[in-house]
Image (spheres, rainbow, N blue to C red):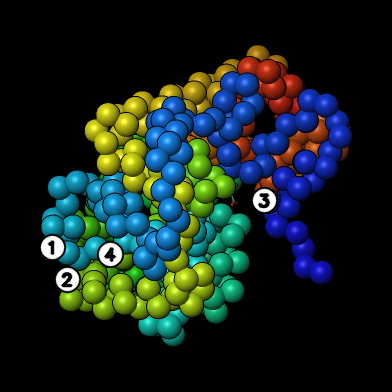
Amino acid sequence: MVPGDPILGLTEAYNADPRPGKVNLGVGIYYDEQGRIPLLRCVRQVEQAMAAEAKPRGYLPIDGLPAYDLATQKLLFGAQSAALEAGRVVTSQTIGGSGALRIGADFLKRTLPQAKIAISNPSWENHRVVFGTAGFEVSDYRYYDPASHGLDFAGMLADLGALEPGTVVLLHACCHNPTGVDLTAAQWSQVVALVKERGLLPFIDIAYQGFDKGTDADATAIRLFVDSGIPAFLVASSYSKSFSLYGERVGALSVVAADRDEAKRVQSNIKRTIRSNYSSPSTHGGAMVAAVLGSDELRAQWEQELGEMRERIHQLRAGLVSKLAALGAPEFGFIQQQAGMFSYSGLSKAQVDRLREEYAIYAIGTGRICVAALNSGNLDKVAEAVYAVSRG
Ligand code: LMR
């Protein structure tokens, strides 16, 4: 036996819990006001059209649906990106963002067998597992400052600056998972300059594009890396959250190479890596995303629906903070400064255990809560329980 997964294992325990009124603040999923995973209107429309067409199901190419890959590149790098124009970017549809990370990890391990990787402290629980399983030695760079509930930027710069040249550095583009603590654009500029000067290889994870400021603003880090002229970097992206298509496993791996020829060589290696893992991705989710992003009208509708999710999360943060303050716990104000679905609440493992055992509220042992799982029906209960365990 090995220990259960800290995130998905918690959902298993939540599902098995018979108590009414239970709340799952563990896994990173956006739930609507009724506590349901939304089916976006743009997705429903495309899916109905696809069902009516009832197309045969051939294999996709190894690197996925070309229209999906192209639309993903434009969303990440900007439609007018000079790097796209120059043919320096290759994108492959993958089995979710996790699949993109693993394909990228396997590709890097084969191409740069001596390279190590550094991830933020803390990082998404699965980063260490994915890169460790791919054979990487995984180290941390300082990121979160528990005292301020914010960024330890000086520590981050110091640690990145001390990494061996050639080290892969995993960076969260926006809505940092698990802390909700992001860099400003000015801080990103400093990190980009340092990473470039130090000869590090950035691997950017962007699973929450559009959940903080908007699709373009949330891609600031990617655009700054391209503009810096850094010779190469990787991007793992996901539509799980932004399209509410979790189980469709819609992700992508993009690699920016020095030039068109290198990009072609990279893509040949990526394709071999995919073929030897799962052969090719599945059709349905990718086809839906490509259809939405490929239509001006549906794309605009998607941006609107994504904006609604984003705005609602901002309101939920504000609601939680104000309820906690009204109960007599003003120290949780930092939750409103954090971005995306998650907040590092500052609760200890023992306090999280009490939330689960006494109140049927599930959170990650590190204190991470998914703010996007709150609604007007459970917010008071959660605030009261958080208040109680923080005072007990
Ligand atoms: C999360 O962090 O909760 C999500 O990204 C879901 C997952 O696969 O862990």
- Dot 2 crowding, Cα within 10 Å, few <14, some 14–19, many 20+: some
- The residue where tag 2 is placed is 260
Query: Which quadrant is home to the C terminus?
Result: top right
Cα distance in 3D space between marks 4 and 1? 11 Å
Q: Name the foreground residue: 60 vs 363.
A: 60
Q: Is residue 275 above or below residue 92?
A: below
Please report whichever mark, 2 or 3, sits nearer to the chain's N-terminal start: 3
Q: Is mark 3 within 8 Å of ligand 1?
A: yes
Q: Name the foreground residue: 217 vs 189.
A: 217
Cα distance in 3D space between marks 3 and 4? 31 Å
Secondary structure beneath dot 1 equals: loop
- The residue where tag 4 is placed is 90
Q: In the picture, residue 211 is in which quadrant?
A: top left
Q: Is residue 381 above or below residue 63?
A: above
Residue occupying image coordinates x 35% and y 57% = 65
- The residue where tag 1 is placed is 86
Q: Is 124 left or right of 348, judged from the image as shown?
A: left
**CB of mark 1 within 8 Å of CB of mark 3?**
no
Cα distance in 3D space between marks 1 and 3? 40 Å
Please report whichever mark, 3 or 4, sits nearer to the chain's N-terminal start: 3
**CB of mark 2 within 8 Å of CB of mark 4?**
no
Q: In this rendering, does residue 5 appear at all?
A: yes
- The residue where tag 3 is placed is 7
Q: Amino acid at mark 2?
A: Arg
- Judged from this view, the residue extending furthest toward the top is 326
Q: Amino acid at mark 1?
A: Ala
Q: Is 220 left or right of 112, judged from the image as shown?
A: left
